[in-house]
Image (cartoon, rainbow, N blue to C red):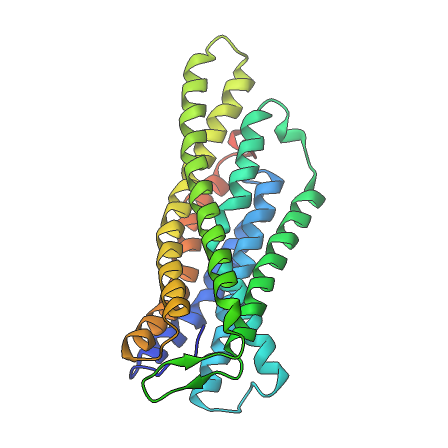
Amino acid sequence: MLPTAKLPYLEHVELALDIVGPFSALYFLFLLRRPVFHLNLRILLAHFSIGLAMMTFLRMFILVDSMMPGTFLTGKCAFWVHLLHNGFVLTLMDASVLMAGERFVATILVDRYERIKYWMVTVAMCAAMSFVNMYISYFVMIRGQNAVIQDNGQLNFEYAHYNMDIIYSLVVLTTMNVAGVVVFFVLFNFNRKRWQKDRTKKLGHRYQIAENMKTSKQLSIVLLANLVISAYLFFVLYYVLAVSKRNRFTDTLSQFFDITVAAAAILLPCLFIKPTRHRKNAPVSQQGGV
């Protein structure tokens, strides 16, 4: 996200990952056409997949432009491409928030949730979360403008007063992501105990609880991996923002940050693709759509 002195050949590795990334995300998006999950959850997963695809797609232009300056990004175009890319990167840091909320509602309204189709509310929440990410990204971009590097590597920013605001925002996003993952595991254990306890309930009631357990377990694996990745991203961003110094360590850290983001765009959809294909091939009568 920050200009770095690239290590030899690593940017080519990142470019290769960024080329593959959109295909992985878009294939998962294609699988979501079939109602293997509830409509609201499919919207959230589609929002996440589109964010990953756009993040790697825009990063390709940034990398090619860094290899051949002035090829694609000039003037205001460069500013907006970097702003959008950084905003999509932040999607990794708050991915579990909306999904945890959706699973909470699915657990509370277990007998009625399958019939609830308030997709416009879900779309509005996705738009609001994207706006927050882009808003933070805007201040990251403003902070980096007109920076001056001193002989000792210290960076002087014209808008350095935004540093703490950005750091606080990242702390909030990361905390919410952690809370979201915790909620997933709490809901899974709650549904498991509920399924064992409600043996006298109707078969349909227990079936919906079982589907909630299956969905929460599948999501928790992906979001646990995402949590580890987002924790690393938070560490890198916090360190670079707090130190505000350009040296070999921060350059290397920033470059591995970008490679981690590119790899995450491939890994996270792949963790979903296999179990989603399994549910896709199951008879419709066996799919809860929860």
Q: Quadrant of residue 101?
A: top right
Q: Residue at x 49, y 8 (%)?
A: 200
Residue 130 percent across, percent down from the top left: 60, 57
Between residues 180 and 136, which one lies in front from this camera angle?
136
Left or right of residue 7: residue 271:
right
Q: Answer above or below: position of 105 versus 207.
A: below
Q: Is residue 277 above or below residue 192?
A: below
Q: Can residue 57 be seen in this snapshot? A: no
> Farthest residue in the front direction?
161
Q: Residue at x 58, y 88 (%)?
A: 74
The image quadrant of residue 233 is bottom left
Q: Residue furthest top?
A: 200
Q: Horizontal and vertical percent for residue 28?
A: 50, 54
Count the labels in the image. 0
Q: Residue at x 52, y 11 (%)?
A: 201
Please state which of residues 49 and 35 is positioned toward the viewer in this rendering.
49
Inspect this view and state whether residue 268 appears: yes
Given residues 184 and 196, the one toward you in this image is: 184
Q: Is residue 288 above or below residue 17?
A: above
